Image: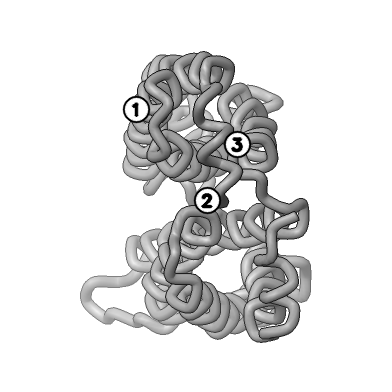
Amino acid sequence: MTEETKIKTRKGGFIGVVSIILGAGGVFLSYIFIFLYLGRILVAETAAARECRLVAPFFLPTFACVGILGGILWLTAGVGFFQKKEWGYKVGVIAVVIALFASFWPNIPTMESGVAVPGPWFLIFVPNLLVFFFLLRSRGQESWGKSLLGLVVGMAFILEFINGIAATTRMVNRLAEMDPLAPDYGPAMMYMLTMPTNMIASLLLGFAAVGLFISKKKDLVRIAGLAGAFLGISAGFPLAIYSMFFTGQGPGFSMFLMGPVVSLLVGLVFMSSKMMNKIMRNT
């Protein structure tokens, strides 16, 4: 947070109202969407014999809980803004990153199953994306370069976690198909290896995405970003290559590729001291 942010917090009425709306809306919609769509998604996925049917009952409620946490943090940030506290901005940054994270992936199984197109969670994701830039630019007085870097790191955070979910899905299905009398872990091995590494990469990148704007220990943020990017690359590219060429379905594009590609971009930025210093310098 810059010195100018301290001045901005004296007039926190508007962003306070926005925080309360996003917080209350996020909590309410996270509950409603689960009750409205979880059963329908599971029925559609099961009828289509898609692999998500085995893990969706776990991951969808988990994301709803994370979304509720994001909403609660938005409400907390709103109190900080109304009372002109500097910590309102920091809590708001954490809230918006968590809300964006929690409201992106659930749209994928919802649209894939044909239950709702576009996915209803975009009602949470899109407003938070807009407020992300408003919060950073108006309240944090952050540069466009730093704001966009935060967005890219946040994208890597989300995509690496999605890779972890997808690897979990493939792993669970391969293990379920395994003959218990003659177990063969080969078809599941790549997913067993890369599922936890993608998840850990996601957590490191999530820390970097938040730390860019609220942490004073910029070296620690850079280390976390580099470690997350390298881990995402080392887990993501082998997973994508295996999925595209060695699954017996013939060569083809794999969505697993998105995570390591974005992680590579993040890694290139964090590796360059010159570029990092230029981006981190506020306008």
Q: Which mark is residue 76?
A: 1
Query: Which residue does the image show at 68% across and 75% down from the upper left?
Result: 277
Q: Give the amino acid type for the residue marked by disc 1 in the picture.
A: Thr
Asked if the residue at tag 1 contacts the one at tag 3, i.e. Cβ–Cβ closer than 8 Å, the answer is no
How is colour applied across the structure in the image?
one colour
How far is mark 3 from mark 2, CA to CA?
A: 9 Å
How far is mark 2 from mark 1, CA to CA?
A: 18 Å
Q: Give the amino acid type for the residue marked by disc 2 in the picture.
A: Met
Residue 22 rendering spot, x and y as whole percentages:
50, 21
Q: Locate the C terminus and report the quarter of the image it occupies.
A: bottom right
Q: Give the amino acid type for the residue marked by disc 3 in the picture.
A: Arg
- Disc 3 or 1, which lies upstream in sequence? 1
- Disc 3 or 2, which lies upstream in sequence? 2
Secondary structure category for the residue under label 1: helix
Q: Quadrant of residue 76?
A: top left
Q: Quadrant of residue 118?
A: top right
Relative to 174, say whether 53 is above or below: above
Between 188 and 35, the one lying in front of the other is: 35
Q: Is residue 268 left or right of residue 229?
A: right
How far is mark 3 from mark 1, CA to CA?
A: 16 Å
Q: Which mark is residue 139?
A: 3
Between 125 and 34, the one lying in front of the other is: 125
Secondary structure category for the residue under label 2: loop
Residue receiving disc 2:
1
Q: Is residue 51 left or right of residue 281?
A: left
Secondary structure category for the residue under label 3: helix
Q: Which mark is residue 55?
A: none
Between 272 and 268, the one lying in front of the other is: 272
Query: Which residue does the image show at 52% across and 22% down from the upper left?
Result: 12
Q: Would residue 185 be seen by someone viewing this image from the given angle?
A: yes
Q: Would residue 162 be seen by someone viewing this image from the given angle?
A: no
Relative to 118, say whether 257 is above or below: below
